[in-house]
Image: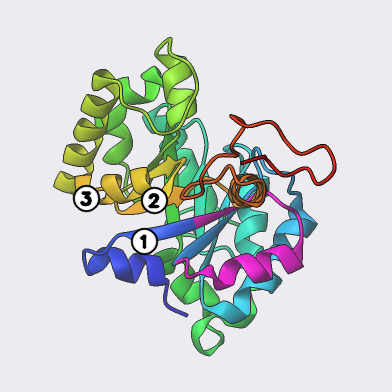
């Protein structure tokens, strides 16, 4: 089946990506109905293992989102397994050199373009006309993460590796690498200048740039800046933010609600303020 993220990029459209840290098919099923273009299972920092990744894919599959995975590291075993499970894209952390980028492509592609072993136990069922092996190399997205000074030093060489479809920026690790505090929605002029460089270099090569964001507003701003894939927090973060907002609103502390009037003493019998 065609990769909808790749189709969107070819049409010049940005995609909005969900992020799953919760290892549960039901949670993935509900989350995938929110309107995301793609949903990524986070096996690096999320509470996910291989079996929960497969379960999340099963939960999201009926809803038309493109399934992707952030693998825990750049090594052939896990890259091959998540692709066999049905991932349409692999986001890989800490790709810092041309050699590491070439290795990632090799792990994700079947021969002659790579060294991926044949055995798409789940993914093979969804190949067009049973020809998964014939279409996988063209449909699967290979996306290294750019999140260190070393990666920035080697940026052009990484982007020039054949088979790289896009990059994904991890703002927290990028900040740490540059001696800054780890956070997502960054406003430092030097970071924004780096983003401009990334967008310029990827655009020249017809490669997409992606970014992890903390809030929807910042993500929208980054789309207007030129990013073609934006993630908003993750399922845990969005759940906690919504829960906190609901609790505050119920207590009269939320946006649009007046704060409790503490200027008048409460009636000891009813608890109501006097006056």
**Residue that carries the numbered disc 3 in the rendered image:** 224
Residue at image point 32% right, 42% down:
161
Q: Nearer the viewer, residue 107 or 192?
A: 192
Q: Is residue 163 visible?
A: no
- Kindly report the distance in space between the C-alpha atoms of the residues bearing marks 2 and 3: 11 Å
> Residue 230: which numbered mark, if any?
2
Residue at image point 68% right, 43% down:
46
**Residue that carries the numbered disc 1 in the rendered image:** 15
Q: Earlier in the sequence, mark 2 or mark 3?
A: 3
Q: Decide: is 144 above or below 192.
A: below
- Asked whether residue 28 is drawn in magenta, I would say yes
Q: Earlier in the sequence, mark 3 or mark 1?
A: 1
Q: Which residues are magenta?
A: 18-36
> Residue 97: which numbered mark, if any?
none
Q: Decide: is 149 above or below 6.
A: above
- Asked whether residue 137 is drawn in magenta, I would say no
Residue at image point 22% right, 69% down:
11
Q: Is residue 65 left or right of residue 265?
A: left
Helix, strand or loop under label 3: helix
User: Which picture quadrant has residue 62?
Assistant: bottom right
Q: Decide: is 40 above or below 159.
A: below
Local crowd size for mark 1, using a 10 Å CA cut-off: few (<14), some (14–19), many (≥20): many
Q: Could you tell me which quadrant the C terminus lies in? A: top right
**Color scheme of the displayed model:** rainbow
Mark 3 and 1 residues: CB-CB less than 8 Å, in contact? no
Mark 2 and 3 residues: CB-CB less than 8 Å, in contact? no
Mark 1 and 2 residues: CB-CB less than 8 Å, in contact? yes
Helix, strand or loop under label 2: strand
User: Looking at this rendering, what residue extends furthest in the front direction?
Assistant: 275
Residue at image point 35% right, 66% down:
6
């Amino acid at each position: 089946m065609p990769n909808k993220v790749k189709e969107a990029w070819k049409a010049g459209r940005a995609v909005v990506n969900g992020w799953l840290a919760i290892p549960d098919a039901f949670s993935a099923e509900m989350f995938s109905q929110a309107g995301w273009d793609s949903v990524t299972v986070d096996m690096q920092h999320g509470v996910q293992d291989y079996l929960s990744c497969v379960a999340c894919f099963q939960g999201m599959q009926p809803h038309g989102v493109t399934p992707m995975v952030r693998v825990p590291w750049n090594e052939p075993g896990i890259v091959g397994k998540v692709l066999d499970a049905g991932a349409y894209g692999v986001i890989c952390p800490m790709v810092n050199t041309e050699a590491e980028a070439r290795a990632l492509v090799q792990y994700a592609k079947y021969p002659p373009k790579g060294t991926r072993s044949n055995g798409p136990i789940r993914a093979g069922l969804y190949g067009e006309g049973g020809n998964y092996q014939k279409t996988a190399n063209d449909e699967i997205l290979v996306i290294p993460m750019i999140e260190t000074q070393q990666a920035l030093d080697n940026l052009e060489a990484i982007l020039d590796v054949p088979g790289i479809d896009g990059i994904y920026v991890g703002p927290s690790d990028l900040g740490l690498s540059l001696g800054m505090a780890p956070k997502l929605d960054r406003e430092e002029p030097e970071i924004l200048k780096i983003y401009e460089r990334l967008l310029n270099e990827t655009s020249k090569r017809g490669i997409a740039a992606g970014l992890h964001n903390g809030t929807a507003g910042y993500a929208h701003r980054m789309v207007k800046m030129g990013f073609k894939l934006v993630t908003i927090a993750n399922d845990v973060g969005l759940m906690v933010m919504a829960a906190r907002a609901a609790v505050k609103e119920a207590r009269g502390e939320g946006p649009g609600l007046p704060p409790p009037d503490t200027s008048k003493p409460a009636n000891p019998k009813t608890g109501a303020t006097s006056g």
